[in-house]
Amino acid sequence: MTNSSTSTSQDVQPVDVDAKKRELHGWQYWIVAALALSASVFHLYTAVFGLRSAMYQRSIHWLFMGGLMFLLYPVSKNRPKNRIDWWDWVFAGLLIAGCLNIILNWEVITMREGAPITSDIYWGTIMILLVLEGTRRAMGLPLPIMATIALAYAFLGPYFPGILSHGGFALDEIAPFQYLRTDGIFGVPLGVSASFIFLFVLFGAVLSVSGAGQFFIDLSIALTGKSRGGPAKAAVVASALMGTVSGSSVANTVTTGAFTIPLMKTAGYRSEFAGAIVAAASTGGQVMPPVMGAAAFIMAQFLGISYWDIVIAAAIPAALYFFSIWAMVHFRAGKRGIRAMTDEEVPKIGPVLREGWHLLIPIITLVLFLATGYSAVKAVFWSIVCLVGASWLGDEKYRMTPKRVLNSLIDGAIGAVDVAAACACSGIVIGVIGITGVGLAFSSFVMSLSHGILPLALVLTMIGSIILGMGVPTTAQYIITSTLAAPALAQMGVPMMSAHLFCLYFGVLADVTPPVALATYAAAGIARSNAIKTGFTALVVAVAGFIVPYMFVYNSYLLFQGSLIKIVLGCATAFLGIIGLAAGVQGFFVTHLALWGRAALLSVPLLLIHPSLISNCLAVGIIALMFVIQKRRAAQVVSPVLEENPEQ
């Protein structure tokens, strides 16, 4: 149910990221809108006057999100989307009643000191089933299947072999545990959704309604359009800017790609490459400070540190990732002879900033509040207030009128439903891990399988994170892999921050890893390209994302840990490694590269994964030598410009 849509060019048909949702009208729309508006008002109220206690805050949050989940998502794609089926009213009512049971009777429940009664078992069973079914509708089958397997493991523990075996738990133990504990359905993931994530999604919705998306695109083109490969560089910058306020790779892809993909195709890029650039850059939004993805808030809770610490640690790796895509575009443009945009095609930076400069104020405000010690909840609340006020400083089309504010409050609550569903369902898995102790067993398993060899353990964790990320949302993937694998990496001497970011990065990269690569499917729909070819092209474009995590595991300076001199030197060599990687992949540096030259440059980032004085000097020497050789060759021979049909 949406009343706003992304503006697109007439020749572009973007993928509808809300295709599963109902499009409601009349009284049914107003009921859903009222529920969504109430959710936004509640979260804004608690942001100002303080969060409720854990179970109250999470139960009220899930009451709104779970109710909306069944009212917005039909049981199957074959059901009519213009009305709500009677059974969905029943499901929504049951979920709301289950949450109200906790809200109204929590003091009585706590007085029992964990001793469940019959109604607790019934309500717990009902809530588990509702979470599984609602998540299936909103997120698809993989995450509910994983949660079901986890529950089966809890019941059938005695039948599992070796270290996976446990005593087993009956329904009258599992159901109340999942329902009435803060390490089940209402655990840390849903708690973070109830406190941080909802407000940041709301912030993104207000920005979207205010026209920030088009402003970011115009600003990106104004900054990069006249350089070599300008349209593709604009896509990278626009995705990075959108990533500062949105943690959804698919939403970023649709928003920025609707305009930048046609520009890239017109400039001479193939459809697959144009879609791949947008998909890879948009995926990086989930690791782009200050907002990053929902998983970053959960990471702060898991590590017991402030969200600002996560933002600082993630800054250099995110910069390396986006710089790598920028470099890919730059060298690709040189190789294919892609022209820069003309003066007529590039908007002037002055008029763009004069028209939309005020849209930068709330983002700057958010960073300043986080940097000065405010909680993420307070920071994002005042950023929303600042955005509404600042909108009146700009052009009339950007002004947040009461109607637009109302629409953004409704859209924000609806946009938070998917993440809340993933968090609730992930809570089931986390609850099983906690009650069975399988987390310790898994850590022992990783240690045993890798024989205590860190590189092998990292590769195993990478493979597991990518496979898991293909099937479940990034937030759920991070929750599960960090719970299982991060402790094992920590036992091998990896700092916990590095271990958690390592798990997050490879879960994020699942969005550009075929065969399940959601961001590339969205981009391919806009580019009208083959989805599989676009997926593999995006995988190549985003290849730095597979190297950067290994870099910051072995080089903590890339997480802003250590002396300033070492951080600067570590960053300098890392960026050199990214240049070598991009040039080697694209086969172009100053001019076209021979096979041996590509191999030499591709070795540079590998030399810098585990930095030492010798490897650093060797890497710098290779870059410098190749640059000199290429410059001489470019001076002696005019490199041919390859002609290419954009549609081939």
Image (tube, helix red, strand yellow):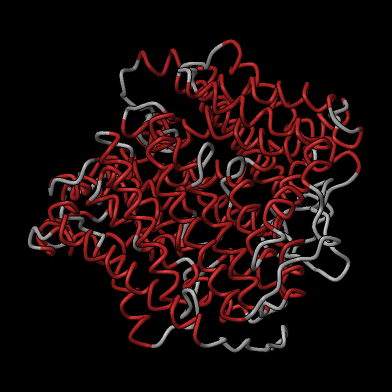
| On-image quarter of the C terminus | bottom right
Q: Is residue 404 left or right of residue 196?
A: right
Residue 68 x/y as whole percent: 68, 40
Q: Is residue 494 left or right of residue 175?
A: left
Nearest the camera: 177 or 425? Answer: 425
Residue at the spot 56% in from the left edge and 19% down from the top edge: 378
Q: Is residue 620 left or right of residue 329?
A: left
Nearest the camera: 517 or 591? Answer: 591
Residue 418 x/y as whole percent: 59, 47
Using the rendered image of the protein, determine whether residue 320 is visible from the camera's viewpoint: yes
Using the rendered image of the protein, determine whether residue 522 is visible from the camera's viewpoint: no
Q: How many marks?
A: 0
Q: Is residue 611 left or right of residue 540?
A: left
Residue 311 x/y as whole percent: 44, 36
Residue at the spot 40% in from the left edge and 62% down from the top edge: 578
Residue 237 position (above or below residue 174)? below
